[in-house]
Amino acid sequence: MPYRAPAADYQFLLDHIVGFDEVAATERFAEATPDMVSAILDEAAKMSNEVLAPLNRNGDLHPAKLENGVVRTSPGFADGYKAIAEGGWIGMAASPEYGGMGLPFSIQNAVNEMMGGSCLALQLNPLMSQGQIEALEHHASDAIKDLYLPKLISGEWCGTMNLTEPQAGSDVGALKSKAEDNGDGTYAISGQKIYISWADNDFSENVCHLVLARLPDGVPGTKGISLFMVPKLIPDENGKPGVANSLKVVSLEHKMGLHGSPTAVMQYDGATGWLVGKPHGGMAAMFTMMNNARVGVGGQGIAVAEAAYQHALAYAQERKQGKAAEGETILGHADVRRMLAQMKADVFVARAIAAACAAAIDMQTATGAPEWTARAALLTPIAKAFGTDTGIEVAQQGIQVHGGMGFIEETGAAQYLRDVRVTAIYEGTNGIQAMDLVARKMMDGGEAAYALIDEIEAYAESCKATMPELAGPVFTAAETLRETTEWLVEQEMNDRFAGAVSYLRMFARVLGGYYHLCAANAAGLDSARGRLATIYIQRLLPEHGSLADQARQGADDLYALSEEDLVA
């Protein structure tokens, strides 16, 4: 079965689940009418299905290569990128002042997922550019904006982010890259960066690197880091790509998956760069790009989950094996039906969380209201971690549905797991997302969390008369989440960290119950969505109880198990 972009599912989420009508009612996004949104989703789905999806296997079988210092991309990727750029899909949410559409992030999020489900390796390229666009819009000088934004938005130039170094992964403050003032408004950037996604290509006119480096007077740690725009080709006086900068792709990583996306080691040897933002203010600017990317990476996990689910379902509809309780294929076996139902139920949850996060970001952008800022901040680590965890879990379940054929590369089932595995690692590992949730996002004493829990409980209460068998468990789970949150905010930080992953997953499980309840209420209990909601609430939501127990354990037992015990 060919990939089918989930445009209808996004339409349902926007119309009935995440309150997109409130986004469209703001002055900022008044042009995002139902007809416009529907047309955009349909057109993006068409491009994803017909243009990008056929490239996915090419990227895996014919990886990007580095030849004589030049990156050669996978067959067909140049044409696929051209379709993305010419369709205006890179600058959907960017400012119209520089050629963007000014659409809500909610729409960009939906389109990105559809492109990612069709060909994740290629979709990662415009995702990087989108993050850079947002960082420049918020932090760059007018001169940099005027020069770079129109080119990035049109897709003529591509953008990257350069954070990681061999000794500085999650601890970004340990970086050694240096920047020295040239005295003419430019800086000489020197150092090595690793794991740079789409560091180069053979289809755009220029590649624009945002690079973290330390000025001579920069203090140790993250507070002394600055951000610089370092282009591959230095623009001339007319803004055209000119002479080559003093940077190079040293090598491409040999990766588990995402073979079509070149991940590079980059070397900067006194390369010419321009300061973005204030001196020593690089992390503030980079976090703008990283937060954009975190929601986007969560969407990548969901994208692969959707594609892996469709792949497994198609196989189950054709494969005959044993005597099934219903029909002639393995889809009639109870355990296969269980796997597919749970895969589909969790894909919906992850997508709903990401869509709700995107809508909150839009409301924050449109209104500046602190409650929307808090809601967006709270949902971001959940969207990233649960979205990517779901991608991994659904992809591995997809292999299981295939049985022995899932372990055979020719079926294509294994590629989904290999491609998606990195999403739980980059843009902040999922453990770091969980720690962020219980630390930075709980600095308000849990106020933002309680506001969302209040919303869930009020909705569940309103549904008890018509759907008690679904509403009751959702209300109970939300109350357990409240009690766990109350316990959490009273603990020392390391005790919070010890249960952070369990707490984040518990929060996602409860949100899943809420969104499935909303879906059942909107579509009817005796509908496909109602039946799926029943499976989720009866089979998956109960996990919240054991997750609550794990979240409340504290850290003592972990440290009671010594290093010697682990070795023994």
Image (cartoon, rainbow, N blue to C red):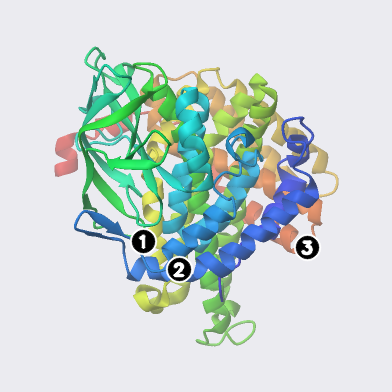
Which residue sits at x=52%, y=78%? 315
SS state under label 3: loop
Residue annotated with mark 1: 260
Which residue sits at x=55%, y=61%? 306
- Residue type (three-letter) at the residue carrying disc 2: Leu
Residue annotated with mark 2: 55
Give the camera-side residue of 336 and 162: 162
Q: Is residue 384 visible?
A: no
The quadrant in which the C terminus is found is: top left
Q: Earlier in the sequence, mark 1 or mark 3?
A: 1
Q: Is residue 251 left or right of residue 260?
A: left
On the image, the x and y values in percent for residue 35 come to 79, 51
Q: Is residue 444 left or right of residue 101?
A: left
The residues tagged by marks 2 and 1 sit, at their Cα atoms, a distance apart of: 9 Å
Give the crowd class for mark 1: few <14, some 14-19, many >=20 residues within 10 Å.
many
Which residue sits at x=25%, y=55%? 70
Q: Is residue 267 above or below residue 410?
A: above
Q: Is residue 431 visible?
A: yes
Tell me the tag on residue 302. Answer: none
SS state under label 2: helix
Residue annotated with mark 3: 527
Name the mark nearer the viewer: 3 or 2: 2
Q: Is residue 368 above or below residue 78?
A: above
Q: Earlier in the sequence, mark 3 or mark 2?
A: 2
Give the crowd class for mark 3: few <14, some 14-19, many >=20 residues within 10 Å.
some
On the image, the x and y values in percent for residue 301 come to 48, 52
On the image, the x and y values in percent for residue 361 come to 61, 33
Give the crowd class for mark 2: few <14, some 14-19, many >=20 residues within 10 Å.
many
Q: Earlier in the sequence, mark 2 or mark 1?
A: 2
Question: Do the residues under discs 2 and 1 have CB atoms within 8 angstroms?
Answer: yes
